[in-house]
Image (tube, rainbow, N blue to C red):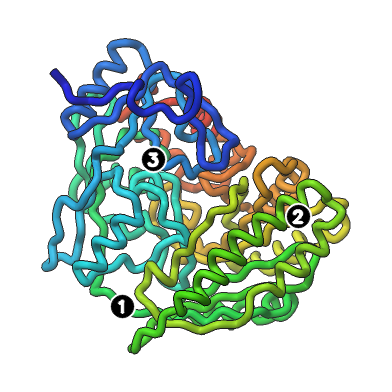
């Protein structure tokens, strides 16, 4: 008898419902399974096809789109976790698809290893993060998916397919950011390197200065990002660069005060106030922009790249050509200043170099990411609609796991290799076993 766990063991919500982290997506799958092996996962896929049910795998639910929602079989990778192999000669690590990034980072650090770059949170599973194109910021180092050297996945017929640059290379080109449309990822092989130190320099900087000096700030730093506070002319900037050491981490008390008390506790309380009394949001934004002081510290990569995010929100993020980012941000600020919008969350700006992944938001072009957020429970549609109008005017590509209204017709224009992906999908999943409403919209039927 299969040891696959069924729906009754893993409900997230009431009456068999599943909700994402942001609370804006709800699904009621016919059943849920948590396979304990690749063979059990393949069996679950074959059984779903026999029963006429669609299949979707879900990670930690950190996507704001309905990319993981299904009314069919929801596959949870909770038992598919851990490191399979570390190859120090090739400098790779192979990890089960359900492993949270946090657990991977800790395990790699114990082995004296690290990913080259990562996003700013590490709660996602490795398969969920890569399948949606999760990224950090980097002058030369790209998204987490760009660090993949091999993939294993179960396809629609229940077979196990492996791919890399040398094996099934056309699948590898697309499946690193596969949107869950090509199969269920079961294991990922990442490139790693010996663990290193990063020095982070965080400091306030006027919005106009950041834009005037953006090219210089980007060119002079391995990892540059900043947060602009709407209704103000203020930003907080962060520059991360490799360091010979020694390590000088943030003190425990200061770290708790700034990263937990201010950035999470006080910020959440301020958003509660802003949601109840929107008229006070601009004043709150001015206070928030001045709450954190400049600081410099040196630590291992995951402790510098990532930070806790406990305040719930919804988010839209677009990648625009890097050369268009300053103009795009000026237009965004003008729109906010002229509107009656009240926005309590900062706008996050990051960059990535061009990569060769078919549906990567940085595919074939150096990119800059602009992310807009709203506190959960606050009306966001007017803000996101106005921002999206600006982003799409610059040929923007939305993050696959964050809110947007674009469809397959739009993507066929902004992704030169869009047809390659849909043709591969036709070959691997002709009956659309892995389809849901989101994929129907963004990839076509």
Categorize mark 3 by other alpha carbons within 10 Å: few (<14), some (14-19), many (20+): many
The answer to whether marks 3 and 1 mark residues whose Cβ atoms lie closer than 8 Å is no
Instruction: Name which of mark 2 and mark 1 comes first in the sequence.
Output: 1
Residue ID for mark 2? 343
Q: Total marks drawn?
A: 3
Horizontally, is 335 left or right of 384 in the view? Answer: right
Mark 1 element type: loop
Instruction: Name which of mark 3 and mark 1 comes first in the sequence.
Output: 3
Horizontally, is 344 left or right of 82 in the view? Answer: right
Residue at 68 percent across and 57 percent down: it is 345
Residue 59's label in the rendered image is: 3
* Position of residue 426 measured from the top left corner of the image (x, y, whole percent): 37, 28
Q: Is residue 183 above or below residue 287?
A: above
The answer for how far apart the CA atoms under marks 3 and 2 are is: 29 Å
* Position of residue 376 measured from the top left corner of the image (x, y, whole percent): 65, 44
Residue ID for mark 1? 196
Q: Residue furthest top?
A: 51
Horizontally, is 89 left or right of 246 in the view? Answer: left
Categorize mark 2 by other alpha carbons within 10 Å: few (<14), some (14-19), many (20+): many
The answer for how far apart the CA atoms under marks 2 and 1 are is: 38 Å
Residue placed most toward the observer, 353 or 224: 224
| Quadrant of image for the N terminus | top left
* Position of residue 97 measured from the top left corner of the image (x, y, whole percent): 28, 44
User: Which quarter of the figure has residue 261?
Assistant: bottom right
Residue at 30 percent across and 25 percent down: it is 33
Residue placed most toward the observer, 15 or 418: 15
The answer for how far apart the CA atoms under marks 3 and 1 are is: 29 Å
């Amino acid at each position: 008898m299969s040891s696959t766990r069924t729906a009754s063991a893993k409900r997230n919500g009431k009456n068999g419902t599943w909700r994402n982290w942001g609370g804006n997506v709800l699904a009621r799958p016919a059943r849920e399974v948590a396979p304990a092996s690749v063979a059990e996962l393949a069996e679950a896929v074959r059984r779903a096809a026999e029963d006429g049910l669609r299949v979707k795998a879900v990670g930690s639910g950190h996507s704001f789109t309905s990319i993981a929602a299904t009314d069919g079989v929801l596959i949870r990778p909770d038992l598919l976790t851990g490191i399979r192999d570390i190859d120090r000669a090739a400098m790779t690590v192979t990890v089960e698809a359900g492993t949270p990034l946090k657990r991977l980072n800790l395990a790699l650090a114990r082995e004296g290893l690290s990913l080259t770059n990562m996003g700013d949170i590490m709660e996602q599973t490795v398969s969920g993060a890569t399948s949606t194109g999760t990224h950090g910021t980097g002058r030369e180092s790209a998204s987490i998916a760009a660090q993949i050297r091999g993939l294993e996945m179960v396809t629609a017929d229940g077979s196990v397919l492996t791919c890399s640059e040398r094996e099934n290379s056309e699948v590898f080109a697309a499946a690193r950011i596969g949107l869950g449309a090509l199969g269920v990822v079961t294991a990922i092989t990442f490139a790693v390197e010996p663990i290193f130190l990063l020095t982070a320099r965080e400091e306030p900087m006027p919005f106009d200065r950041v834009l005037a000096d953006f090219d210089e700030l980007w060119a002079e730093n391995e990892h540059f990002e900043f947060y602009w506070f709407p209704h103000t002319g203020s930003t907080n900037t962060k520059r991360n660069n490799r360091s010979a050491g020694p390590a000088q981490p943030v003190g425990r008390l200061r770290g708790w005060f700034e990263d937990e008390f201010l950035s999470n506790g006080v910020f959440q309380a301020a958003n509660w106030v802003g949601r109840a009394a929107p008229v006070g949001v601009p004043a709150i934004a001015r206070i928030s922009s001045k709450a954190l002081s400049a600081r410099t510290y040196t630590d291992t990569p995951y402790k510098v790249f990532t930070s806790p995010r406990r305040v719930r929100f919804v988010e839209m993020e677009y990648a625009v050509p890097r050369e268009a980012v300053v103009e795009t941000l000026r237009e965004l600020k003008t729109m906010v200043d002229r509107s009656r919008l009240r926005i309590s969350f900062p706008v996050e700006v990051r960059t990535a170099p061009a990569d060769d992944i078919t549906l990567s938001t940085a595919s074939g072009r150096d990119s800059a990411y602009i992310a807009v957020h709203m506190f959960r429970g606050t009306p966001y549609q007017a803000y996101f609609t106005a921002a999206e109008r600006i982003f799409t005017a610059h040929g923007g590509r939305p993050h696959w796991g964050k809110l947007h209204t674009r469809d397959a017709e739009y993507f066929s224009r902004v992704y030169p290799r869009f047809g390659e992906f849909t043709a591969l999908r036709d070959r691997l999943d002709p009956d659309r076993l892995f389809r849901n409403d989101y994929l129907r919209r963004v990839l076509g039927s």
